[in-house]
């Protein structure tokens, strides 16, 4: 079969089939044009204020030649730097999720899978079985460890704030002695809110700036509330919450204007004040989390950061969003190894 016949067959494919063909050809070529462009963007963003040493944070680093690494698709040249202060060498991917990677040609496709919210086994299928779901698990959490460091800017105007709860989970842990293991998630031992539930706070202004974080087990407490959200609020903000007393106590302490809505649903709106945006965010979050059939509580903050990123990008799997996610995951320091991720523990 010659090239003309292949072109005719390619033209007959639908859009999804053409994308699959493009990814297949990219994974089998040595040029890797898309990853190289991403590397250039990472270099520009990381070093716009100078070459900072990842070890001592000194900006006296200089270029120190290039070196070649062998990957599954060929050899790739990388720029090396050397710090004049501590004399350590590093490169553009040191302390990033892509450090020591041997499969750079797969990362763009994996980012696509993350934007789509695929499960690990679905990702393996999309990557044609070139990596296992165990490897992709660590890839995922290294990226999420970076995304959760993206700061939440100060809120403006009206801020809706409400908590939601997830069942405390030790998914993946063996030899649980405190209780009987649950099957397929299971149910809490006690009715209502108890220490079997993990509290997640979501705050969101009308410009869609969002904070979401794990506050601990059981009911929300004022001290935890101030620790989590205090730096993002000012006296110019107006709080809209439900009637839980921790919110009232916090707003009184900070001197914030406060509108409360009871959970009976009789009054949902007071002029421009309501909590429907944050409740809608809760609904989307819970629906999105259902696809994972339960998430270990120690990784819950990672998944909250993942969903916050996708929601801010409106779940669009575009070239711009893929590049943005790749570059941003390399702008924050990540020192978590596979062993550290595996042995991490939840602390409330």
Image (cartoon, rainbow, N blue to C red):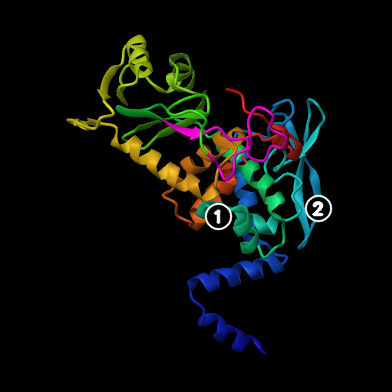
- Of 50 and 99, nearer the camera is 99
CA distance for labels 2 and 1: 30 Å
- Of 136 and 294, nearer the camera is 294
Main SS category, magenta section: loop
Quadrant placement of the N terminus = bottom right
Q: How many marks?
A: 2
Examine the structure image and report whether residue 180 is included in the region drawn in magenta. yes
Q: Residue at x 55, y 34 (%)?
A: 301
**What residue is shown with label 1?**
118
Examine the structure image and report whether residue 171 is included in the region drawn in magenta. yes
- Of 94 and 111, nearer the camera is 111
**What residue is shown with label 2?**
69
Element class at badge 2: strand
Element class at badge 1: loop
Give residue 91's quadrant in the image. Answer: top right
- Of 313 and 54, nearer the camera is 313
Q: Which residues are magenta?
A: 164-186
* Residue 272 visible at all: no
Mark 2 vs mark 1: in front: 1
Q: Residue at x 52, y 30 (%)?
A: 189
69 horizontally vs 262: left or right: right
Q: From this view, report whether residue 329 is shown above or below residue 115.
A: above
Position in image of residue 337 (x %, y %): 74, 37
Q: Residue at x 61, y 37 (%)?
A: 145
Quadrant placement of the C terminus = top right
């Amino acid at each position: 079969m010659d090239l003309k016949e292949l072109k005719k067959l390619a033209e007959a494919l639908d859009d999804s089939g053409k994308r699959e063909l493009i990814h297949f050809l990219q994974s089998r070529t040595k040029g890797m044009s898309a990853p190289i462009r991403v590397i250039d963007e990472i270099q520009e963003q990381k070093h716009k204020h100078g070459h900072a040493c990842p070890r001592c944070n000194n900006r006296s680093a200089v270029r120190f030649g290039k070196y070649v690494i062998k990957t599954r698709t060929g050899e790739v040249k990388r720029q090396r730097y050397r710090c004049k202060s501590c004399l350590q060498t590093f490169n553009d991917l040191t302390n990033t999720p892509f450090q020591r990677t041997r499969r750079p040609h797969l990362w763009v496709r994996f980012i696509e899978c993350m934007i789509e919210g695929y499960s690990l086994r679905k990702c393996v299928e999309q990557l044609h079985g070139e990596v296992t779901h165990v490897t992709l698990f660590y890839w995922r959490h290294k990226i999420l460890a970076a995304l959760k460091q993206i700061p939440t800017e100060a809120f403006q105007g009206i801020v809706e704030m409400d908590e939601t709860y997830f069942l405390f989970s030790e998914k993946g842990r063996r030899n649980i002695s405190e209780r009987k293991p649950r099957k397929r998630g299971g149910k809490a031992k006690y009715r209502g809110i108890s220490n079997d539930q993990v509290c997640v706070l979501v705050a969101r202004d009308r410009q869609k700036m969002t904070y979401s974080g794990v506050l601990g087990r059981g009911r929300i407490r004022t001290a935890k509330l101030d620790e989590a959200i205090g730096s993002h609020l000012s006296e110019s903000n107006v709080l809209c919450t439900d009637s839980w007393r921790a919110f009232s106590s916090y707003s009184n302490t900070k001197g914030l204007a406060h509108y409360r809505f009871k959970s009976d649903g009789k009054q949902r709106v007071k002029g421009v004040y309501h909590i429907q945006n944050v409740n809608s965010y809760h609904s989307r979050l819970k629906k999105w989390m259902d696809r994972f059939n339960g998430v270990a509580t120690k990784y819950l903050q990672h998944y909250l950061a993942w969903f916050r990123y996708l929601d801010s990008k409106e779940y669009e799997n575009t070239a711009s969003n893929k590049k943005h996610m790749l570059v941003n995951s390399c702008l924050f320091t990540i020192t978590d190894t596979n062993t550290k991720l595996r042995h991490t523990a939840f602390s409330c």
